[in-house]
Image (cartoon, rainbow, N blue to C red):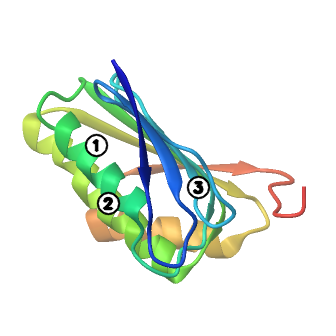
Amino acid sequence: MTHLLIFESLREEPFHMTMQDNHCHIPPTDKTPEVIFNADGTLSIKGRAMALNRTAPSEKLLDCIERYLKNPAGTTTVIIDLEYLNSFGTQILVAVIRKISQVTNHGKRLVIKWYYDEEDDDILERGHHISEAFNIPVEFIPTRNHSLFN
């Protein structure tokens, strides 16, 4: 059964989120990334993370993760592919990683793949900082032509 939910957040446009069992999809906006979280344990966050405040989509993603943690897959894979990440977006991403890393408390495996433009040292450094802060191994994967202007 699929539900379409519409939420309003302060100073942002309404967003649409579909939820089906343990599947969550939050479409991208000009300031927030697309988020796809499948019941098979794959969480994909792609696009721009330029939020200036805690948004309803980020709260709903944390709710999806909470539901997922009740019966996580053997391996949970987080794919982060951001072309822009501001300080507040980093805070939201840290909250997401903190929450999803709880799968290891259930004896499950966590894999994080962090894609970054090979010319973007800032996003790479943020990824290293998050990896060190949580003591979680992250696979850093350089890409080319990952630009806001393409």
Q: Residue at x 33, y 24 (%)?
A: 39
Badge 3 element: loop
* Residue under the image location 53 percent in, 59 percent down: 14
Viewer-side residue, 4 vs 150:
4
Placement of the C terminus among the 4 image quadrants: bottom right
* Residue 59 x/y as whole percent: 32, 60
Whether residue 136 is visible to the viewer of this picture, yes or no, is no
| Dot placed on the residue nearer the N-terminal end, 2 or 3 | 3
For label 2, the residue is 59
- Above or below residue 6? Residue 110 is above
> Circle 1: is it few (<14), some (14-19), or many (20+) Cα within 10 Å?
many
Quadrant in which residue 47 is drawn: bottom right
Tell me if 47 is positioned left or right of 18 in this view.
Answer: right
Q: Is residue 30 left or right of residue 68?
A: right
Say whether disc 1 or disc 2 marks the residue closer to the N-terminus: 2
Q: Residue 33: give its label.
A: 3
Distance (Cα) linking label 1 and label 2: 9 Å
| Rendered image: mark on residue 24 | none
Residue 15 location, x and y as percent? 52, 54
Residue that numbered label 1 is attached to = 64
Considering the numbered disc 2 on the image, is that residue within a helix, a strand or a loop?
helix
Q: Is residue 90 above or below residue 101?
A: below
- Residue type of the residue flagged with mark 2: Glu
Q: Quadrant of residue 82?
A: bottom right
Mark 2 near mark 3, Cβ–Cβ under 8 Å?
no
CA distance for labels 3 and 1: 16 Å
